[in-house]
Image (spheres, helix red, strand yellow):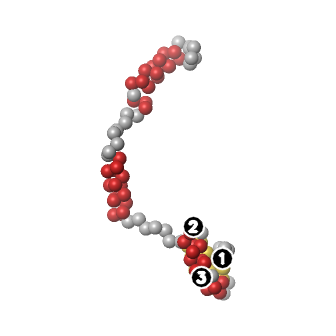
Amino acid sequence: MNSVISVTEARKRFFEIIDWAKNTEGEIVIEKNGQPAVVISGAKPVVTQKDKKKILANFRKVMSKFPQETPLFQTKEWRNKESKYLKNLSEGKLRGE
């Protein structure tokens, strides 16, 4: 569908335009007497502050059920490998020697 159509064409294809706008993120400009008169685009969902708070509360509730994991760089195994690597590096050894 073209993005600019005449008012006469829009009247003939009104329901097709509505369906197109609903299912895409595009816009259609409707011209009257060769001048832009109206822009039709699909409605975007409205999320209120109350909705955001509800979503965030639900997210926190779900995430609270999972155990807290120690980040990889704070584990004992990582620190041991890192210190060994740095020691070898300071001695001029490359990895795997």
Q: Residue 55 location, x and y as percent?
A: 36, 57
Q: Is residue 31 visible?
A: no
Q: Residue 38 location, x and y as percent?
A: 58, 80
52 vs 44: above or below: above
Q: Residue at x 66, y 84 (%)?
A: 9
From mark 2 to mark 3, how far is it between C-alphas?
Answer: 17 Å
Q: Which residue is mark 3?
A: 14
Q: Nearer the viewer, residue 62 or 60?
A: 62
Of all residues, the one furthest to the top in this rendering is: 91
Whether residue 45 sits left or right of residue 11 in the image: it is: left
Q: Residue 6 location, x and y as percent?
A: 66, 83
Residue 25: mark? 2
Of mark 3 and mark 1, the one earlier in the sequence is 1
Residue 4: mark? 1
Which label lies toward us, 2 or 3?
A: 3
Which label lies toward us, 3 or 1?
A: 3
Q: Residue at x 35, y 47 (%)?
A: 63
Of mark 2 and mark 3, the one earlier in the sequence is 3
- Mark 2 belongs to which amino acid? Glu
Q: Secondary structure at mark 3?
A: helix
Whether residue 84 sits left or right of residue 61 in the image: it is: right
Crowding at label 3, few (<14), some or many (≥20) Cα neighbours within 10 Å? Answer: few
Q: Secondary structure at mark 2?
A: loop
Whether residue 1 sits left or right of residue 21 in the image: it is: right
Q: Residue at x 36, y 52 (%)?
A: 59
6 vs 95: above or below: below
